[in-house]
Image (cartoon, rainbow, N blue to C red):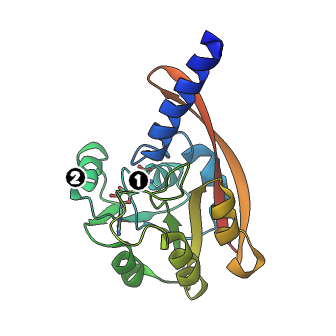
Amino acid sequence: MHKREKMTRAWTRESQKHLGRRKYGGQSKAAKSILPLLPKGTKIVEPFAGHAHVSVAALKSGKFSEAVLGDLNCKALTWVKKNRKTDKIKMKCQDWKKTVAQNDGPNTVFVFDPPWKAETSCYTAYRGNCKQVADEIVEKSKSLRGGSVLLLGDTPEHRKIACSRSSKFHCKTITVDSKIFGNKSEWKEIVAIKK
Ligand SMILES: C[S@@+](CC[C@H](N)C(=O)[O-])C[C@H]1O[C@@H](n2cnc3c(N)ncnc32)[C@H](O)[C@@H]1O
């Protein structure tokens, strides 16, 4: 194998590792592409908020007037509180299902950005059944009064779950450009929007 090919493979492995660990911050580059795809509403709710880049951008744009963030990781929410000084955001350190139950309504738009890993569609930081979370969100969304948008890595497994006819979502694909350790990186994401 040529040196260049070896280096490319090593870089791909490294970037996959980091894409898999996207955690918070993952949507900082994607937010501007996601924003125009969000349905209309007054309240944006992120039950897997992390650093909540989509909600913060949505408030800044004036598209929504209030945001509710939920996450099991209190540290992520504390970071948002410290860095985004606004009284338009409410936060709760709790499981996603509780955030959904407390905030549904005709003017709510839920943005679900659950943890996923590029290669396996699974993610160890998810505290619940990682394999089922996308399925559960799709099922839950069917009975919501508000809008629902699901963000997932573009994998065949995720497409089967979120983009099939029975899911009641329609899917758009966005390309996200980022820099990891100074190297340019690109990945594709599904934005599934409840019909
Ligand atoms: C992909 S990150 C969200 C990134 C975020 N959209 C951003 O812009 O920074 C997923 C988040 O889900 C949280 N999480 C994992 N399991 C959870 C659960 N059962 N309920 C609520 N949040 C959970 C993790 O702590 C993590 O912050």
Q: Name the one closer to the observer, 104 or 75.
A: 75
State the residue at coordinates (55%, 48%).
118
Please provide percent x and percent y for residue 115.
44, 58
Instruction: Work out which residue is located at the far front of the displayed protein and give it.
Output: 1
Which image quadrant for residue 164? bottom right
Label 1 C-beta lies within 8 Å of the nearest ligand 1 atom: yes
**Mark 1 or mark 2, whichever is nearer to me:** 2
* On screen, residue 165 above or below 75: below
> Residue at position x 59%, y 19% from top?
6
Give the residue at x 36% y 50%: 51
- Residue 195, percent across and down? 71, 76
| SS at circle 1 | loop
Horizontal side, residue 58 vs residue 21: left or right: right
Identify the residue position indicated by label 1 in the image. Answer: 52
Q: Is mark 2 within 8 Å of ligand 1?
A: no
CB contact under 8 Å: marks 1 and 2: no
Vertical relation: 178 (above or below) 141:
above
Q: Amino acid at mark 1?
A: Ala
Q: Residue furthest right?
A: 165
Q: Secondary structure at mark 2?
A: helix
Q: List the residue tagged with mark 2.
A: 75
Q: Residues within 10 Å of mark 1 (few under 14, many from 20)?
A: many
Most distant residue in the top direction:
3
Q: Position of residue 146 (x, y in %)?
A: 55, 79
